[in-house]
Image (cartoon, rainbow, N blue to C red):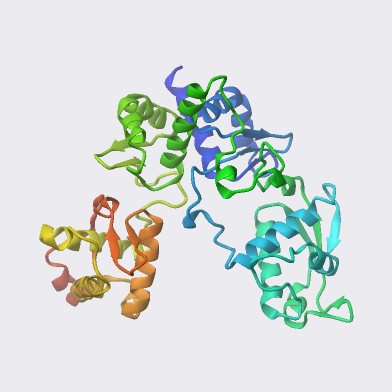
Amino acid sequence: MNMEEKEELQQAARILMENRWVTRRDMPEEYLSIRRLERPLRQFFRDRCGWPLLVTAQFYKLEKIPARPRGFMGLSAMQSQEDYVLLSCVLAFLEEYETGGQFLLGDLAEALLSYYPEDAFTKKLSWEDYGWRKSLIRVLKLLAEEGMINIVDDESEGFVSGGIKDGVAAGEALYEVTALSRYFLRNFPKELQQYNRLAELMEAEFFTESTEEAQAARLRRQRLYRELLLSPVLYKGEDPLDFLYLRNRRERIRNDLEDWLGLHYELYQNAALAVSHEQNAWFRDIFPVRFRGIHDIMLHLSHYLRQLPEEALDHDLTAGEWKQHLQALTEAVKSGWTKEYREMSQKRLSEELLAEMEDWGMAEVQEDGSIRLLSAIFRLEGAYPEDYGQKAEGSGKSEEKA
C-alpha cells in the first residue's frame, strides 16, 4: 500500500469514527471514499473492535459500541431520564411509518400516551405538564438534527405553551420520516426480551469464534480497542491480563492506531491512551479544547498540583482539602480566566470542574465526597508566563501556553 492509499484509508476510517452516519446526499465525496474502501474498513473494525459496518444505498454507519457506558457518552441534547424514555417511544412510533411518511405532532402526542411504559422509573407522562411538552420538542429537535425526520411545517411553540385542549394540540407541526430513523438504535443478536440483565446486553456480540479460548481472546481484544478509541484513558483494572495484553501487543496496537487513525499509543504502568499530536485533530471533542475556559482551568490545576509536595497528593483529597487547593488556584490565576469563570462562585466552579475532570478520566468523586485524582490530570499542564501579571496590568490581556 503506497502513502496515498494509506492516507485515503486513514481518512475514511476517521470519517466513520467522527460521524454517526455518512449519507450519500449530504456527504457524497466521503460516502464514495468509504464505498471504495468498504472491504478493508469492514474487516478492520470488525476484527479489532467487533463493530459492524452498516450499509444501505443511502448511508454508511459504523456501530460504535462502547466497552462500557460512560456519562460523557450520552446525548448532550437530552436533559433527563424522561427525555431518553420519550426518545425510545418516539422511535417506536416512527417504525410504523415508511420512508417519506408524514405525521402530525398532535397524533404523535396522543400515541405516546399508550407507548410510554407504565412501569417506567420516571414520572407519569402527561401533556398537561409543561416539562413533558418541552421534553417532546427536545426529542423531535434531536431527531431532526440527526436527519431522522424532516420538519415540513412547524408551529410547535403553541404546543409547548398551550398543550392539548379537547384532544387538539394548541400548536401543530408536520414531520416526515427518513430512512435513518430505523438505524439510530443499536441492533442486538437476540430480541431484547431474551436479555434479563444489563450485563447480558453489554456482553452481546455479533461475531463469535469456534472455540471458547479464541472467543475469550477476541472479546478481550475488542473490549480494549473499544476503550482506547472511545474513552479518554484506560486505567489498569481488576483483570491483570488486560495490561499484559496491552504490553505484549503494544507494537501491533501502535501500528493499528497510527496507520488507521493517525493516533499515537501511550502505555504507562497503570494507564493506556490513544492521543493525537495534531494541534487541529479530527476529533470534535478533544482535550484541551481551544477557547473552552474550563479546560484552561484544568491545565492550570495540573500545573498547580505538580508544585505540591508528594505527601499532599498521596491520598484521596477530602472535601476541605479540595476546597483549599481550588481557592489557592483561583487566587493565583483567576484574573486570566474567561469572565464566566472569574465571576463564578467557588461551589459552582468546583462542581463544573469535577464533572469535566470525571468525563476526561482525571478524577473520581467517591461516595464519601472525597476526590481521587487520577494520573491523566498530570498528562498536560498549563501556566502563564512569569511576567503575566505585568502584561495583564499593562494591556488587560494575557497569554497562556501548555
Which residue, as the protein is rendered here, is positioned at the far top?
1
Residue 217: percent from left, percent from top: 45, 26
Relative horizontal placement of residue 222, taking residue 150 as reference (left or right)? left
Relative horizontal placement of residue 7, taking residue 98 as reference (left or right)? left
Identified at 36% across, 46% down, the residue is 233
Q: Which quadrant would residue 29 be assigned to in this image?
A: top right
* Rendered-image quadrant of the C terminus: bottom left
Residue 244: percent from left, percent from top: 31, 31
Q: Which quadrant would residue 248 be assigned to in this image?
A: top left
Is any atom of residue 42 visible in this view?
Answer: yes
Residue 294: percent from left, percent from top: 35, 65
Q: Nearer the viewer, residue 66 or 121?
A: 121
Q: Nearer the viewer, residue 297 or 186?
A: 186
Q: Nearer the viewer, residue 132 or 3?
A: 132
Q: Nearer the viewer, residue 108 or 247?
A: 247
Residue 362: percent from left, percent from top: 32, 56
67 to 173, vertically: above or below: above
Relative horizontal placement of residue 260, taking residue 327 as reference (left or right)? right
Is any atom of residue 275 visible in this view?
Answer: no
Identified at 36% across, 38% down, the residue is 239
Q: How many marks?
A: 0
9 to 362, vertically: above or below: above
